[in-house]
Image (tube, coloured by chain):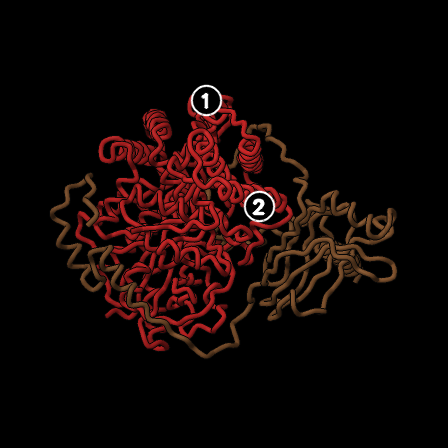
Amino acid sequence: MPLGFLALVLHMHLPYVRHPENEHFLEERWFYEAVTETYLPLLQIFERLVNDNVPFRLTISLSPTLISMFTDPLLQQRYGNHLEKIIELADKEVGRTYNSPFHKTALMYQHRFRQARYLFNDVYQKQIIQGFKKYHDLGYLEIITCPATHGYLPLMMVQPETVRAQIATAVDVHRQYLGTLPLGIWLSECGYAQGIDDLLKEFKLRFFFTDTHGVLFASRRPRFGVFAPIYCPSGVAAFGRDVESSKQVWSAREGYPGDYDYREFYRDIGFDLDYDYIKPYIHPDGIRINTGIKYYRITGTTNHKEPYVFEWADNKAAVHAGNFMFNRQLQAAHLKKLMERPPLIVAPYDAELFGHWWFEGPLWLEYLIRKIHFDQDTLELITPSDYLTRFPCNQVAQPCASSWGNKGYHETWLNQANDWMYRHLHYAAAQMVELANSHPDAQGLLRRALNQAGRELVLAQSSDWAFMMSTRTTVNYALSRTKSHLSNVLKLIAQIKENHIDEGWLSSLESKNNIFPRLNYSWYQSHYRPDFS
Amino acid sequence: MTVFFPWLFGFLIIFLFMLAFLMFKKHKVIFNLRSSTPKASLIKSDLPLSMEEYASDLTAPSPVMPQPQKPGEELPGKYNIDRLVLMARDPYWLYAYWEISAAIQEEFKTNYGPFAWGQSQPVLRVYDVTGTNFEKQSPLEYTDIPISDQVDDWYIQVGQPDRSFCIEVGRKFQNGHFVTLLRSNVVSTPRASLSEQVDEEWMWIEDLYRTIRHQYGVSSPLIEEEIAGRMGIVPLGISSPGF
């Protein structure tokens, strides 16, 4: 038995950004960039670890919107085009930078993009989800789900039926693409409020995560703090986030990602190079965008930046992995003295931090996993379900309503920038439940309209929109998405009530907002309970 | 000395400026907390003040770039329903929004006279209903917040973690008589500290053990052997069947 357990959790999510109406939609690039910089590099490190016989256990939550984008033929095709374009640019860059201090880095990008193309086209045949499924089936990953469109559940509890529909959709998508029922769930933004666990239990979901105070401030003082899960009275386990390990990675100032040797995110050739040269690789309207090719290291706190040196960054990633492990070992050894069982350190991160923001993040993770395996036996990697298998007896307490957002509660998703949404969201949700109840067995066009109303509602419920409004990033996009999905739901509801469904328009919605083709409006019925027999 | 005094004077001016600035800020916050209408003003205080650890800041890799403005469909201002919805934002604050239909206003006028609406003051009545049954147990203690006819939402500072609240929107006459128009749902503010309750209850979930073993085909102590055993046989690039 090790002295302590470490549960690394990567939460993978992007909002549904698919815009068939325009091939050059800027927001679709969020997805392309994350695939190239985060998702494919993670699959590469899993492959390397497996090839080198390094066992590991990692928890990954794959959001249903992300799975839907992974598996969407249009986005797959567009990502393929995107890769070709970026490879073309990388090839040019290799020539342009010849005999300059940037040449090696240009070669690195060329190699990386080509590798991405090889993985995407040849290894996974455009089905990235198969990569994750493979390591899940092999027992390296424990893939869990998260609410369908990353709905912020605590503020949806006014209509618990819509929380249930978010979960039902998530479980269905998970089962469709991963072939198993998820054992746990990542609650969007760690947003928890009393009652949510009862809904999770209906879907046989065994555990979820909260921020530190979600467990620490539970109704009964948890004997082991956040270093062991607690059971809600419903029997669903809540795992609390460890502050120390979060800070080391997250904090922009004291955390690893700010190291001067690491790659600078904000110096991209999309902005730095001559307009005429870069024009074919930015937005056709001339809007400069990130290309993903960045030649500088963080260097220091000023605007002065020095060329990136991969070897230095690679070395730092190894040093930081060692430091992280060393700190967890100390932490575990210290905690073990205070507890009757090995402490569990839960370290969750947004996956997109790794590779996209923190370019060297995937490398760090790989070094960490290798070091844990080869260099020590104090710590052992574990997943929540492994832990519950070993320790099925846990303390019972009601977790505290909380989130991992600013100030720890619901304010990021409920403030003067976004509070106007809720009267519309709740109204649409109540109407959706009412219609689902009053049409127990809809068929044909009516059924299609009800299902599409459900899709538009879940799309409007994405926590991402409220978040963007709060942080004032891409606000117009967030406003436009919220309003358009809400007005689609309202219009569908009106047409259903008036028994006058515009089939042409409905078909256009079905093809434009085509997420969750299996979504069943009956999941919104008040008496709906899942049946997994 | 002659050099010192102008310096001192300069510092004094700077100090006074800072003081004025701080007072202004403080004033602004109080203003924000109390009023619900000036929508844009609270946003500033919502933004993270330091650089550290805002996990969700990094959720979506959003490139900083100019956005093409798109026309967004406008949503209805009213739905013609009566509702008062209460949400707990954090241990200290609640948020409520409401809609009062014309039918309620008419009913009020029928009962209290045609000018009663104008002669009464709109009020939010906040009840602490912790541990009580609101329907059966009255009167309860409450706080009244005078509001205006122009608002339809409000941030309520209750300042009390781990308590339950219910609110009413109503009209208050000059003689103090209060008429309830709408009543909200009950919400509880989250805890903001460790629980005082230290007695422990434990639960053993045997079923969990079985299920996980069944689903995974590996019980954890065996996991390393399992993985090692499978490693050689799985071809790369092809996903293996579930179990």
The residue at the point 74 percent across, 44 percent down is B103
Nearer to us in this view, B40 or A219 = A219
Residue A349, percent across and down?
40, 52
Drawing shade for chain B: brown
Marker disc for residue A279: 1
Name which quarter of the figure residue B158 lies in: bottom right
Left or right: residue A152 versus residue A7 is right
Q: CA distance from mark 1 to mark 2?
A: 45 Å
| Residue beneath the point at 66% across and 51% down | B84
Q: State the SS at label 2.
A: helix
Q: Is residue A265 visible?
A: no
Q: Residue at (66%, 70%) from the top-left corner?
A: B137
Q: Colour of chain A?
A: red
Q: Quadrant of residue B76?
A: top right
Q: Is residue A502 visible?
A: yes
Vertically, is A410 above or below A221? above
The x, y position of residue A527, in whole percent, is 45, 50
Residue occupying image coordinates x 65% and y 40% = B79
For marks 1 and 2, the one nearer the N-term is 1
Residue count near mark 2 (Cα–Cα under 10 Å), binned few <14, some 14–19, many ≥20: some
In the picture, which quadrant includes the N terminus of chain B? Answer: bottom right
**x, y percent for residue A219:** 50, 70
Q: Which residue is mark 2?
A: A426
Q: Residue furthest bottom?
A: B199
> What type is the residue that disc 2 sits on?
His
Total label count?
2
Work out whether A45 lies above or below A493. Answer: below
